[in-house]
Amino acid sequence: MLEGQVRELCGSMPLVDNYGGMYKKWSGVLVPAKGSKWIGLLGSNPWRRQSFIELSGDYSLAGKYAGLHTPEKSLLNFMQTHVGASDVPCISPPNAAFTTVASPLTRENALLLLRWIHNLRNKGTRMPERFLTCIRDGNWVKTSAGYKSPSDSFLSSSDWGCLLQMGSLLVDIPFIDLEFYGKRIEKYKEELKVIGVMFEFGEACQFIGKHFMSLASSRDLTRSKVFSMLKFMRFLREKYLPTEDFVKSVMSGRWLKTVAGMSSPIGSILPDSEWTTASIISHLPFIDSEYYGDEILSYNTELQLLGVVVGFNRDYQLVVDNFEWPLYMASITVDCTFLILECIRHASLSDDLLGNIRRQKWVKTNHGLGLRSPSECFLFDSDWNCLMSVADGVPLIDVKFYGSRIQSYKDELKKIGVVVRFEEASIAVSKRFKVLALKNSLTKEQVLSLLACYRQMKETKLQFPTKLMRKAQKYKWLKTKLGYRTPANSILFDEEWMSISRIASLPFIDDDHYGKGIYEYKDEMKAFGVTVEFQMGPRFVITGLCVPTYSAGIAPDSVIALLKCIRNHKSGSIKVSFPKDFANLISKKWLKTVAGYRSPKECILFDSSWASHLEREDGPFIDEDFYGSDIKTYKAELVLLGVTTDVENGLPLLAGHLEYHSCCSVINRIYKYLKMFKWVPDNKTANWVWIPNGDDNGKWVSPGDCVLRDEDDLYSECLHVLDKIYENELVSFFCTALGVRQSPSVADYIDLWKGWENSKTKLAHNECCAFWICIARNWSKKTEKLLFENIKKLPVISTASGGIALSDKDDVFI
């Protein structure tokens, strides 16, 4: 038969398995287990679930079929050739694990397994995952450390393998036992790699590292074992072997004892003197030198390779990451301060940490203010340092303590809130100034410092802080004799103020408090708004005028000073209205006149316009001898006070002053003055008429007691006949101004008759005729009535004497 026909026939031929079952279909065919290699290697049939048929053992036996004798295994060979019955290492691997690799394999089986893998690789057959995994993980490889899995075994070169065995000390590296397997195993290096056997030096180092890490995880990595690790690294270095793989395997483990607990080498610090300052302000993971002893210091190179920080090397970020304030802030040294500033300059700080550094009180300041937070502090600057002395409680960084080096950290200090710029300093000082001003707490020294600072900044062409100037002008911080005032409401005293100060309550800056040195800052005071010139201060005098009760005590220079103030007030740019009680204040009798002290409204300013009518002593004229001739130059100011200056306006004052005179010549001048300007009194019944009795004696009588003329000369005893006393010019004045009668009236005559009735028994002929002529001339019903009611006696001719006698009207017959 042809080969093809045989195959076709075999493909349809049923097969009998080892259990006697007959199968027409299959995925693969295994040679019988007895005498096979697969049963010795695998121990059982792992292909059963994959429809593989394990041939019956009968296929291996000799037999006689159809008269022909078939030798032993002849049929099996036929089956292998034409049916595809296979055995290890030629069969495809099962997708299943097998148990024999979980325990040691004989050399032959181990080599058979490697040969099988070799064949599969050559065919390009992919090995199933479960099959490959059980081979990799099974402990079937004989090594120098016992039976291990391929993934835990090494096949090394004789050079580095021996070295590792020497240097690893406490670690037994599982090298494959070449004496057991012989040189044949070296042919299968690629297959060994496939199943996980390690060949590289680095892998061996990693293995050693993992071993140490397993000790660390079980807390069995003692001090001595740590030193073994370090010694191993030193050994590698000395033999010029790479350490990277070993380092990578151990550097991330938390096996190194530090003062902060167990930590990985990365970020841990080998303590030395360079870290002394940093240790004050941070909780750093220093290697526990008490635990490891000084010996640990000799492994600085090895530790550095592991990631341990050796030497400070400006590692500011490490300080920042472990920043922690000391228990006592006073322990922060100058070096600590500069380290913090260097950290701010070079490292990355979180906002929270920066805020914490701003708030904590750790910066040493001047003036006994102790430790302050940066946000409260100012950095000295020679250009504007004078500002700092303006307000107490301003904490200046102690430059003597820190040295000039502190000036080189302005940017860093600014980040943590220290005031380093003029603008910021001026704002802070302005706020502090406001607080002190509101409490009236600015000391004498601070006020003088403020003025000195203004002068200094002006001289150096620096602009004085606008906000500070505004607050200084707004608040009451200047101590004056009247209490604390704003500069605009204060006066810097000089000699010009002396006179007016006697009659006005003025806010002079208190030189008893500030000392005489305050007067050296006149220009500076003026810049702040203080009144430093007399002519600029009338508003103070007007509002503070205080006329004493004892008016005679007002000196003439005080009055002149007041008039100057009123003049300046009128011409000044700042207009201040007179206070409500100003009129009441000046209504006191404080202006000296020739007639004594009078109120301004009772005074007259004498000048040439008055001289043609009166003399200075004639009325209440201001005493020019007392005040000096300059008093005349303040005519307008006196008018404002109520003093009379115009001739035509002095009538009431001169008329009212008449009663104080007794000299006829003076009275006559006043009468003439009153007549000229047509004065008429409000009350004509008052005693306006002077009846002299000699040169300087006499009396004042009412106009009703006077008549201008008495032609019959009957009234010299009961009425005052003025044409006998005064010139005709004044007689007419008495008539027109005072209403004095031209001559006696009917009533006067009747009164005269009644007087005669009581005092006379006889009348002269002229007396009797004068009476009845008046009655006749003025006859009327009224006159008739007056006669009837008042006349009791009538004139009769006396028979005895022949004269005129008065007789009761009831006894008289016509």
Image (cartoon, helix red, strand yellow):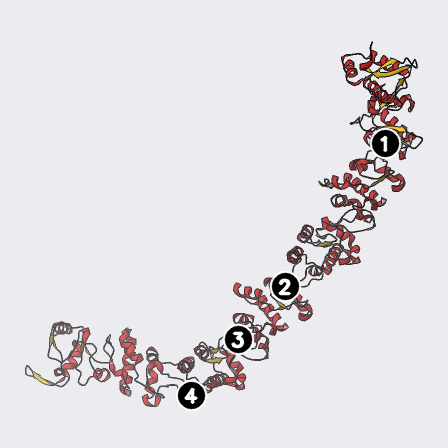
Identify the residue under disc 1.
658
The kind of residue tagged 4 is: Leu
Q: Position of residue 502 (x, y in %)?
A: 80, 48
Identify the residue under disc 4.
170
Label 3 CA crowd tier, 10 Å (few <14, some 14–19, many 20+): many
Is 782 placed left or right of 615 in the picture?
A: left
Mark 4 and mark 3: span between their CA atoms?
32 Å
Q: Which residue sits furthest top?
A: 814
Is 725 placed left or right of 452 in the picture?
A: right
Q: Tell me the mark number nearer the camera, choosing from 1 and 3.
A: 1
- The image shows residue 82, relative to residue 502, as above or below, that is below
Q: Which residue sits furthest right?
A: 695
In the image, 656 versus 472, the foreground residue is: 656
Is 724 placed left or right of 476 in the picture?
A: right
Label 2 CA crowd tier, 10 Å (few <14, some 14–19, many 20+): many
Label 1 CA crowd tier, 10 Å (few <14, some 14–19, many 20+): many
In the image, 20 versus 418, the foreground residue is: 418
Q: Tell me the mark number nearer the camera, choosing from 4 and 3.
A: 3
Q: Position of residue 503 (x, y in %)?
A: 79, 46
Identify the residue under disc 3.
284
Mark 4 and mark 2: span between their CA atoms?
60 Å
